[in-house]
Amino acid sequence: MTANTDWRLQIEKAYEAVQKDDRSKAMTALHIALNDTKAGSSENLRIVLKEMANVYRKFGFEDKATTIGRLLLTPAYTPQMSSILKAHRIAIRKKAILEAADSATADSDYLLADALYLSLLPGPSFYSKVINRDQFSDDYEFTVVDRLTRLYLAHGEIDKAESLIYRIRQMERLINRGEARSDANQIKLAMLDIDQALVDMKRTKYREAAKRFEKSSIKLERILHRDQDKAPLATIYADYALCLARLKRKSEADRYFRRALKIAEACPSLKKSTLSTIETNYQNFSRAKNRGQQLRSAKSKAPKGIGD
């Protein structure tokens, strides 16, 4: 079997797993097929997506199969539509894909979430053609990169996350070389640095991560105007706080957790699940901090033995 048929071999493995009622192996095989560079042509990728939908149906997940068909295999508009209507349909489709990807992430469906998020990224691939991207197609790009980075890291795929960040960073620098000092470009590069900081944390490089968080958060604070959405800063401060906690810089961690919560509670655009995660992490941090203080207090009050 040649290298060009590797993705087809993975589909065969997926169906073998279906016969054994092994959903985990089936989804793993399909995920390998989805990410196979040889499957990158429009027709090959369409086949992979169709087989994904079919396997989901065989396992009784009709809703997931329908999501693939509706959002990834059906054009967002018809050629007869006006340019205004086309743009409207594209915007609706992108929003629907992002919501479906977030839902798949919450449902712990790594394969479906990855396929949906990837469809929102630019590039000469079938993904971009499926949703009929245009020159304004990077609207969701950095939100998607951040969520994909977190998705990959949650599944232990550190190299995959870092490769994604590197690819998007290089693309951004090439495309915007003539306007590198623009606020929009600086925000995008700062967000990519935040994602790299998450990778650094996963590699336990907490000092490097803290430097990235500090530099990028200061840059974003300076650039974001008073009337702009501050929701990104809430998650950045919360992640920075976790990093500071790892470095035992507890007073700073506490301060950034509080700043994150203050912004989160004032941002209607922030998802409730994100606010809940920040609150939970802060509560866990506070409990650990209090336990440490109690232990130190108990040790200081303990009677000393002879010779101590």
Image (cartoon, grey):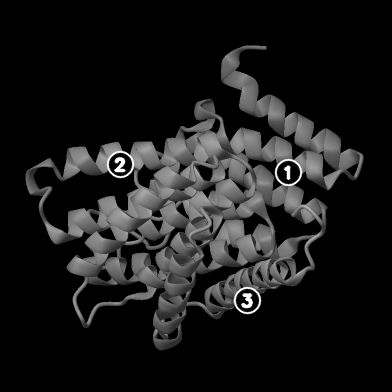
Of badges 1 and 2, the one in the foreground is: 2
Of badges 2 and 3, the one in the foreground is: 3
Answer with mark 2 or mark 3, whichever residue precedes in sequence.
Answer: 2
Farthest residue, direction top: 1
Please give the residue where the numbered disc 2 appears in the rendered image.
169
Q: Is residue 141 visible?
A: no
Label 3 vs label 1: CA separation?
A: 35 Å
Of badges 3 and 1, the one in the foreground is: 3
- What label does residue 283 carry, if any? 3
Q: Does residue 109 appear left or right of residue 224 in this picture?
A: right
Q: Does residue 36 appear left or right of residue 288 in this picture?
A: left
In the rendered view, tell whether residue 1 sits above or below residue 43.
above
Q: Position of residue 166 (x, y in %)?
A: 36, 37
Residue neighbourhood size for the residue with mark 1, other residues' Cα within 10 Å, grouped as few (<14), some (14–19), many (≥20): many
Please give the residue where the numbered disc 1 appears in the rendered image.
27
Answer with mark 1 or mark 2, whichever residue precedes in sequence.
Answer: 1
Label 2 vs label 3: CA separation?
A: 35 Å
- In front: 260, or 147? 260
The secondary structure type at the circle numbered 3 is helix
